[in-house]
Image (cartoon, helix red, strand yellow):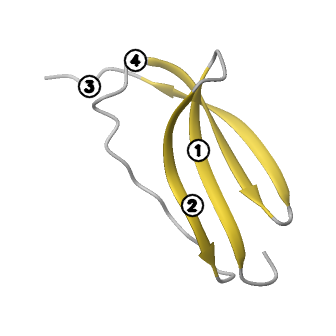
Amino acid sequence: MEATGRVRLRIYDLLGRHVETLVDAQLPPDTYAVTFDARTLACGTYLYRLETAAGVETLRVTLVERAA
Protein backbone atom coordinates (compact mmCIF):
# COMPACT_ATOMS: atom_id res chain seq x y z
CA MET A 1 0.00 0.00 0.00
CA GLU A 2 1.24 3.43 -0.84
CA ALA A 3 -1.27 5.32 1.32
CA THR A 4 -3.58 4.70 4.26
CA GLY A 5 -6.51 2.60 3.13
CA ARG A 6 -8.99 -0.10 3.98
CA VAL A 7 -7.47 -3.54 4.50
CA ARG A 8 -9.54 -6.70 4.82
CA LEU A 9 -8.16 -10.14 5.56
CA ARG A 10 -10.78 -12.86 5.59
CA ILE A 11 -10.79 -16.64 5.84
CA TYR A 12 -13.12 -18.77 3.67
CA ASP A 13 -13.72 -22.49 3.42
CA LEU A 14 -13.32 -24.24 0.06
CA LEU A 15 -17.03 -23.78 -0.65
CA GLY A 16 -16.53 -20.02 -0.47
CA ARG A 17 -18.29 -19.57 2.86
CA HIS A 18 -16.91 -16.79 5.05
CA VAL A 19 -15.36 -18.32 8.18
CA GLU A 20 -13.65 -15.42 9.94
CA THR A 21 -12.56 -11.82 9.43
CA LEU A 22 -9.05 -11.27 10.78
CA VAL A 23 -8.59 -7.63 9.72
CA ASP A 24 -11.10 -5.00 8.61
CA ALA A 25 -9.58 -1.59 9.24
CA GLN A 26 -8.08 1.57 7.81
CA LEU A 27 -4.32 1.03 8.05
CA PRO A 28 -1.29 3.13 7.13
CA PRO A 29 1.39 1.68 4.85
CA ASP A 30 3.61 -0.73 6.79
CA THR A 31 4.41 -4.40 7.19
CA TYR A 32 1.95 -6.30 9.37
CA ALA A 33 1.69 -9.76 10.91
CA VAL A 34 -1.60 -11.31 11.95
CA THR A 35 -2.07 -14.22 14.31
CA PHE A 36 -5.36 -15.87 15.19
CA ASP A 37 -6.69 -18.75 17.23
CA ALA A 38 -7.64 -21.45 14.75
CA ARG A 39 -8.66 -24.02 17.37
CA THR A 40 -12.33 -23.51 16.47
CA LEU A 41 -11.69 -24.49 12.83
CA ALA A 42 -11.69 -28.05 11.53
CA CYS A 43 -8.49 -29.37 9.97
CA GLY A 44 -8.46 -28.86 6.23
CA THR A 45 -7.74 -26.36 3.50
CA TYR A 46 -8.97 -22.78 3.67
CA LEU A 47 -8.60 -19.69 1.52
CA TYR A 48 -7.38 -16.40 2.88
CA ARG A 49 -8.25 -13.29 0.94
CA LEU A 50 -6.41 -9.99 1.34
CA GLU A 51 -8.25 -6.96 -0.06
CA THR A 52 -6.61 -3.52 -0.36
CA ALA A 53 -6.95 -0.55 -2.70
CA ALA A 54 -4.01 -2.03 -4.63
CA GLY A 55 -5.93 -5.23 -5.38
CA VAL A 56 -7.07 -8.60 -4.10
CA GLU A 57 -4.97 -11.68 -3.41
CA THR A 58 -6.39 -15.09 -2.50
CA LEU A 59 -4.16 -17.94 -1.34
CA ARG A 60 -4.62 -21.37 0.23
CA VAL A 61 -3.61 -22.43 3.70
CA THR A 62 -3.85 -25.91 5.20
CA LEU A 63 -4.71 -26.35 8.84
CA VAL A 64 -3.31 -29.55 10.36
CA GLU A 65 -4.00 -31.08 13.73
CA ARG A 66 -1.49 -30.31 16.46
CA ALA A 67 0.06 -33.16 18.43
CA ALA A 68 -1.22 -33.38 21.99
Q: What element carries label 1?
A: strand
**In whole angstroms, how far apart are the C-alphas of marks 3 and 4?**
10 Å
The answer to which image quadrant residue 4 occupies is bottom right
Residue 51 is left or right of residue 45, and the answer is: right
> Quick check: marks 2 and 1 in contact, CB under 8 Å?
yes
User: Residue farthest to the left?
Assistant: 68
Compare marks 3 and 1 and give the one earlier in the sequence.
1
Quadrant placement of the N terminus:
bottom right
The residue identified by callout 3 is 66
Q: Is residue 37 above or below residue 65?
A: below
The residue identified by callout 1 is 10
Compare marks 2 and 4 and give the one earlier in the sequence.
2
Residue 29 is left or right of residue 31, and the answer is: right
The residue identified by callout 2 is 24
Instruction: Give the camera-side residue of 52 and 68.
Output: 52
Compare marks 3 and 2 and give the one earlier in the sequence.
2
**In whole angstroms, how far apart are the C-alphas of marks 1 and 4?**
17 Å
**In whole angstroms, how far apart are the C-alphas of marks 2 and 4?**
25 Å
Q: Which amino acid type is marked by label 2?
A: Asp
Q: In this view, does 11 lie above or below 14?
A: below
Labels 3, 1: front one: 1
Q: Which amino acid type is marked by label 4?
A: Cys
Q: Which amino acid type is marked by label 3?
A: Arg
The residue identified by callout 4 is 43
Q: Which residue is drawn at 50% across and 64% down?
A: 33
Q: Residue at x 40, y 17 (%)?
A: 43
Query: Crowding at label 2, few (<14), some or many (≥20) Cα neighbours within 10 Å?
Result: few
Q: Residue 50: percent from the left, percent from the top?
A: 69, 51
Query: Crowding at label 3, few (<14), some or many (≥20) Cα neighbours within 10 Å?
Result: few
Label placed on residue 44: none
> Quick check: marks 2 and 4 in contact, CB under 8 Å?
no
Q: Residue 48: percent from the left, percent from the top?
A: 62, 39
